[in-house]
Image: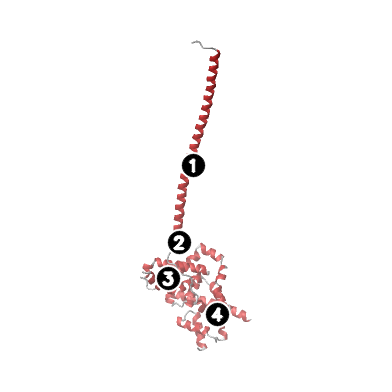
Amino acid sequence: MKQSEFLNLVMPFKDKVYRLSKRLLVSSEEAEDATQELYLKLWKNKEKISSYKNVEAFAMTMTKNYCFDRLKSKQASNMSLVHSNYKEKGETLERKTELNDSVSIVHKLIEELPEQQRAIIQLRDVEQYEFEEISKMLNLKPTAVRVALSRARKSIREQLIKQHNYGVS
Amino acid sequence: MELAKIEQLLEKYLEAETSVKEEQELSSYFSGGDVAPHLEQYRPLFVYFAESRTETYTKTIQLKSQKSNWKWLSVAASVVLLFSVYTGYNEYQVYQAEKAFEDTKMAFQMLNKNLNKGTAAIAYLGEYETTTNRIFKPKN
């Protein structure tokens, strides 16, 4: 496979890879490294890639696995200690949402969810994948995806209502 | 879009039973201007999702591993180290040989000096003999 062919195949979903990494790893730098690393892996396996039906789903699975590994590894535990560094980095998104504080509250609420639910929220509500695709990406049953997603959405809503009522009263 | 339908969709949404298309409908409803007051708390959620979708990866992706550079650097470093150890060892040997040479040279010089002292003493002895010869004429 030539480099140009490879790039045409994998570049369209680079933002999705980055956003999923960022959702899971929190810090932008970590997410950038993860994205870079993932594309290196894809490039090394370029011969195999053409045999996959859905390269994008495959890449998302790899991203998820890589990020979960990172979270488990020692470096990631160090990272969560220096967690505050993301705030400066995360500001790009937050600055945009300064008009509406409650939007950045959503960001924090999602961050507090378990990893699995965070990944599902990201893949469904942000990237708008079908349940079938998500269940393949995360190696879960479609029903399990639905249950986790419903749980995540409900807990975010509950928190939002609390925030909302607090703002009103 | 009528409010009843939105409410219904929201219920389904929370149960994770909406389709992607229905979720897009919800998204466009909440990003629009007129959201019903009692649904206002849902707005940040959908606005946030829509905003998240616009975030992009801005760095360039490199397909050549940067890690191998470090590998080569370590190889180069070890070569340099080996080379310097080797030349250092050679230098040291040369130095040792020079030192040994200097030492032997000094030893020879001392020997030479002392030998000369000896010959000088012998010269005195010779002088002594000529004077005795002068006083006591040797009988032939």
- The structure residue drawn at horizontal position 46% and vertical position 56%, both measured from the top left corner, is B74
Furthest residue toward bottom? B2
Question: Residue A59 shows which numbered tag?
Answer: 3
Residue annotated with mark 4? B44
Q: What element carries label 1?
A: helix
Q: Which of marks 2 and 4 is nearer the N terminus?
A: 4
Position of residue B75 measured from the top left corner of the image (x, y, whole percent)? 44, 55
Which numbered marker is on residue B70?
none
Dots 4 and 1 on the same chain: yes
Q: Quadrant of the C terminus of chain A?
A: bottom right
**According to the image, label 2 marks what residue?**
B67
Identify which residue, B11 or B113, lies in the foreground: B113
- Can I make out residue A148 in this image? no
Q: Distance between the residues labelled 4 and 1?
A: 80 Å
x%, y% of residue A77? 53, 64
Q: Distance between the residues labelled 4 and 3?
A: 30 Å
- Does the CB distance between marks 3 and 2 fall below 8 Å? no
Circle 4 residues within 10 Å: few <14, some 14–19, many ≥20: many
Tell which residue pokes out farthest to the top in this image. B139
For the residue labelled by badge 3, is the local secondary structure a helix, a strand or a loop? helix
In the rendered structure, which disc, 4 or 1, sits on the residue that comes first in sequence? 4
- Foreground: A77 or B18? A77
Chain to which the residue tagged by mark 1 belongs: B
Question: Mark 3 packing: few (<14 Cα in 10 Å), some, or many (20+)?
Answer: many
